[in-house]
Image (cartoon, helix red, strand yellow):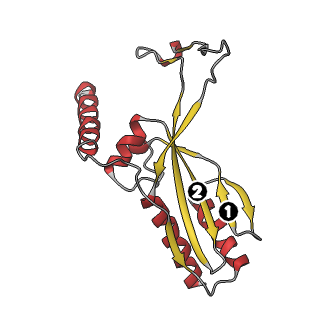
Amino acid sequence: MINTHRVVSAVIGCLLLAIGAGGCSGSAVYSGHEYTIDAQSADRERVVKVIREVLSDRRFVIDRVDGRRGVVTTAFKATQGIVSPWDSEQSSVKQEAADFVNQHERAVRVTIKDDGAIVVSVVVQRVHRPGWRIETESISRSSRTTVIGEDGQREPSRMVTPIGLDGGLAKKIGDEISSRLSSG
């Protein structure tokens, strides 16, 4: 018979170990950069089609496509890190732990330059929910309060802060775009 208390303790221990290991480095989790692909010979319409396919295959919702200017953007997509293994956005255990502990969202912007170069950028933002009180005993008993600012106005119940660029995911997406362009 499986002792559920030991299993839960083991899972919590593994999560704490992953979070601790992810926090040992002094560098920021999302201090990446844009990723550039050289695709000078590709037809712009085909490039936009491939970009849309790659982003859709990664379950990003396409927000804007401007083929003439060569810009494709997505809406922000949330992930839960370690507890969402079907999402492949994270490039390291440190990112898995950071996304588990904080509510992070990513959006992708792909730009086709005039010289044919393709620039992939992934912005990560952290979601803050002021006034949200999580009840640890029963999630159904959680509550929200209204936060009034210094100006006497109600503060928004959801605020976001950009925290950096995910260079690892930008490289994954860029490599996939490049691979599809060269294969077809």
| Mark closer to the chain start, 2 or 1 | 1
How far, Cα to Cα, is label 2 from label 1?
8 Å
**Residue depicted at 55% across the width and 84% down the height:** 182
Residue 90: x percent and y percent?
42, 53
As drawn, the residue found furthest toward the bottom would be 41
Left or right: where 166 falls relative to 150: left
The C terminus lies in quadrant = bottom right
Residue 176, placed above or below residue 84: below
Kind of residue at disc 1: Val
Q: Are marks 2 and 1 in contact (CB under 8 Å)?
A: yes
- Indicate the quadrant where residue 3 lies: top left
Kind of residue at disc 2: Val
Q: Residues within 10 Å of mark 2 (few under 14, many from 20)?
A: many
Residue 38, placed above or below residue 126: below
Residue 69: x percent and y percent?
74, 69
Q: Secondary structure at mark 2?
A: strand
Left or right: where 18 falls relative to 105: left
- Indicate the quadrant where residue 136 lies: top left
Residue 130: x percent and y percent?
53, 21
**Residue depicted at 26% across the width and 35% down the height:** 16
- Tag of residue 156: none
Q: Residues within 10 Å of mark 1 (few under 14, many from 20)?
A: many
The N terminus lies in quadrant = top left
Residue that mark 2 sits on: 108
Residue 17, placed above or below residue 72: above
Left or right: where 37 falls relative to 20: right
Left or right: where 3 falls relative to 45: left
Pick whichever, 165 or 91, lies toward us: 165
Residue that mark 1 sits on: 72
Residue 53: x percent and y percent?
64, 67
Looking at the image, can residue 1 be seen?
no
Q: Secondary structure at mark 1?
A: strand
